[in-house]
Image (cartoon, rainbow, N blue to C red):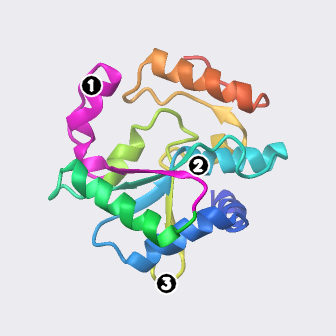
């Protein structure tokens, strides 16, 4: 896994928009744990392997954090606005989510309720695929913290495998269909 971690850091380090986000987050020295994760990282790696421009297919940058003491959507918006202000002219949308409050809106969006997460890592553990269950950040000492509960093998092998911890077959198959159109080399493990 260490080889893949080094390769991940090398890949993201070559992409200025992501490095800007990582630097701004690091400089904020936030009082809670956070990660940049999911699709923007996964898509970037798939693009690098596939020979596409690194920004191809990326719709937004996911920034997740865990702050159970403030479960308001207003706090998410304040952090998002602060980040956008610090980033200036930024070409991507930011999706900023406090994972401690996901259970409050999940049923309205996906049709079934979930229990509150007890940590940021528990939230990432439940993300829809093994390749997208991934978060990273740069620590104050400059080292990268990478959280990949299912390792990075599937990500770097272009394998899409369902993580059945929480999602439904329909959610998985919708994601797969969308991704296959953009990255035809993906090897999809059926539900």
In this picture, is 17 found above or below 50?
below
Instruction: Tell me which label, 3 or 2, sits earlier in the chain.
Output: 2
Q: Do callouts 3 and 1 mark residues in contact (Cβ within 8 Å)?
A: no
Q: Is residue 147 left or right of residue 90?
A: left
Residue at x 53%, y 68% (from the top left corner): 88
In this picture, is 24 found above or below 89?
below
Q: CA distance from mark 2 to mark 1?
A: 24 Å
Query: Could you tell me which secondary element the residue under label 2 belongs to?
Result: helix
Residue at x 53%, y 27% (from the top left corner): 162
Q: Which mark is residue 134?
A: none
In this rendered view, identify the residue nearer to me: 130 or 46.
Answer: 46
Give the image location of residue 122, x and y in percent.
Answer: 33, 46
Residue where numbered disc 1 is placed? 108
The quarter holding residue 67 reads bottom left
In this rendered view, identify the residue nearer to me: 11 or 85.
Answer: 85
In this rendered view, identify the residue nearer to me: 40 or 80.
Answer: 80
Q: CA distance from mark 3 to mark 2?
A: 24 Å
Q: Do callouts 3 and 2 mark residues in contact (Cβ within 8 Å)?
A: no
Residue where numbered disc 2 is placed? 40
Residue at x 36%, y 28% (from the top left corner): 166
Instruction: Tell me which label, 3 or 1, sits earlier in the chain.
Output: 1
Q: Is residue 72 left or right of residue 79?
A: left
- The span shown in magenta is 90-119
Quadrant of the image containing the C terminus: top right
Q: Do callouts 2 and 1 mark residues in contact (Cβ within 8 Å)?
A: no
In this picture, is 5 found above or below 115?
below
Categorize mark 3 by other alpha carbons within 10 Å: few (<14), some (14-19), many (20+): few
Q: Which residue is outermost to the bottom? A: 141
The answer to whether one can see residue 132 in this image is yes
Asked whether residue 104 is drawn in magenta, I would say yes
């Amino acid at each position: 896994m260490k080889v893949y971690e080094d390769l991940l850091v090398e890949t993201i380090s070559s992409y200025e928009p992501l490095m800007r986000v990582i630097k701004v987050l690091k400089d904020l020295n936030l009082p809670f744990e956070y990660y940049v994760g999911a699709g923007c990282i996964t898509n970037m790696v798939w693009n690098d392997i596939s020979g596409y421009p690194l920004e191809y297919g990326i719709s937004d940058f996911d920034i997740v954090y865990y702050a159970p003491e403030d479960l308001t959507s207003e706090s998410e918006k304040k952090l998002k606005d602060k980040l956008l202000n610090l980033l200036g002219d930024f070409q991507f949308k930011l999706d900023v989510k406090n994972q401690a409050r996901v259970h409050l809106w999940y049923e309205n969006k996906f049709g079934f309720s979930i229990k509150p997460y007890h940590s940021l890592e528990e939230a990432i553990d439940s993300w829809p695929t093994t390749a997208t269950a991934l978060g990273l950040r740069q620590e104050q000492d400059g080292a990268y913290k990478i959280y990949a509960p299912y390792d990075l093998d599937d990500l770097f092998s272009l394998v899409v495998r369902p993580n059945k911890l929480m999602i439904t077959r329909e959610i998985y198959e919708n994601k797969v269909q969308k991704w296959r159109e953009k990255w035809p080399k993906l090897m999809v493990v059926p539900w």
